Image (tube, grey):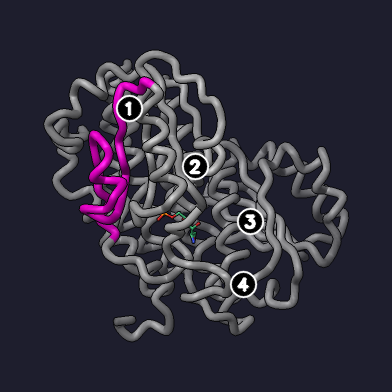
Amino acid sequence: SKDGYRHFMLKEIYEQPQVIAATLEGRLSERRVLAESFGPQAEALLSRARQVHIVACGTSYHAGLVARYWLEKYAGLPTQVEVASEYRYRRVVVPEDTLFVTLSQSGETADTLAALRFARERGYLGSLAICNVPGSSLVRESDLALMTQAGPEIGVASTKAFTTQLVALMLLTLSLGRRHGLDAAEEARIVQALHALPGVVRQVLGLDAAIEALSTAFAEKQHALFLGRGAHYPIALEGALKLKEISYIHAEAYPAGELKHGPLALVDSEMPVISVAPNDELLEKLKSNLQEVRARGGELFVFADESVRLEDTEGVHVLRLPRIDEALAPLLYTLPLQLLSYHVAVLKGTDVDQPRNLAKSVTVE
Ligand code: M6R
């Protein structure tokens, strides 16, 4: 049931504090990720891994893209991420001691499953599925499984499955990191931030009314551009996918530094630009891009934390999020983008939970 919410999607967005807590449950001590989190056979696989290949589709693929930033930064492991429908049809070079990771809410996505079967013949160290459905084909056919605890996700647009995948991927990053030189104090700092995460996510949900107010600027638009840098570039991709899926507005995401290399030509007063820029370090580099957007009459929507020196001015809307450890910022900045697309879709009167042409689980190629 929708528990009084107007749509499943909204209910699922609001469940994120609980399902993130459930995904962390029993997997953390005060300062560390518990070794047992990945099951008894995990030790051999995780300690031998020297690189990681991640394969998934859609929103799950975006979670994989975030994990690449994390695995390379915190665990020092070379990481590749690819959409399953491409991966399964090419010649893939697999370096020795590579761990194969699939990400899937349903565990039944045809391309992801086919990719796993293809990978089995390619000499990987072993496979890990990060999945939300116990007993799914993907879980049954993988060597290891780390379950997300998102509960059933009914809305076709994935929300809580994505943020719980990110939580699981951070647990994987820290587990691999510990075996590959991650400093214990840094692990402890991120683990403490994970403990606090459900509470911070709840605070961000409190911004819903402010986000709904911003959504009116999009209802009449045909296009939107999302910008992010670093691990927030995949969050921009995910924001654009959500807007496309449920509001049918054409949206694209770019790493902010690419703006001048082409997409700037599209910007005018009809092209709102959404940028995810948690802190000043990222924003400094974005600022000149943002000015270029303003100079062409584009309306700007910036999601940033309190530390960012940027004021609301004509055509510039700044929405403040609570401060969070930078390791977890991509997780938090996902939420306002989910809420924004939701409210735009409601304004446009689309079928939010069952958008046209799409199925919840893509079990055919
Ligand atoms: O069940 P999966 O995570 O394998 O599904 C992958 C994609 O089909 C899915 O994420 C799709 O992109 C969603 N509709 C996005 O909201």
Q: Nearer the viewer, residue 108 or 330?
A: 108
Determine which residue is flagged by label 2. Answer: 84
Residue 258 spot, x, y in % from top left: 74, 38
Residue pictured at 27% horizontal, 53% vertical: 136
Q: Amino acid at mark 4?
A: Ser
Residue 260 spot, x, y in % from top left: 82, 40
Quadrant hosting residue 298:
bottom right
> Which tag is nearer the camera, tag 3 or tag 4?
4
> Which tag is nearer the camera, tag 1 or tag 2?
2
Distance between the alpha carbons at the discs numbered 3 and 4: 20 Å
Disc with the residue nearer the chain's start (3 vs 1): 1
Determine which residue is flagged by label 3. Answer: 302
Using the image, determine if residue 240 lies above or below residue 79. Answer: below
Question: Which stretch did the figure color magenta?
Answer: 123-150
Residue pictured at 32% horizontal, 44% vertical: 130
Disc with the residue nearer the chain's start (1 vs 2): 2
Q: Amino acid at mark 2?
A: Ala
Distance between the alpha carbons at the discs numbered 3 and 2: 32 Å
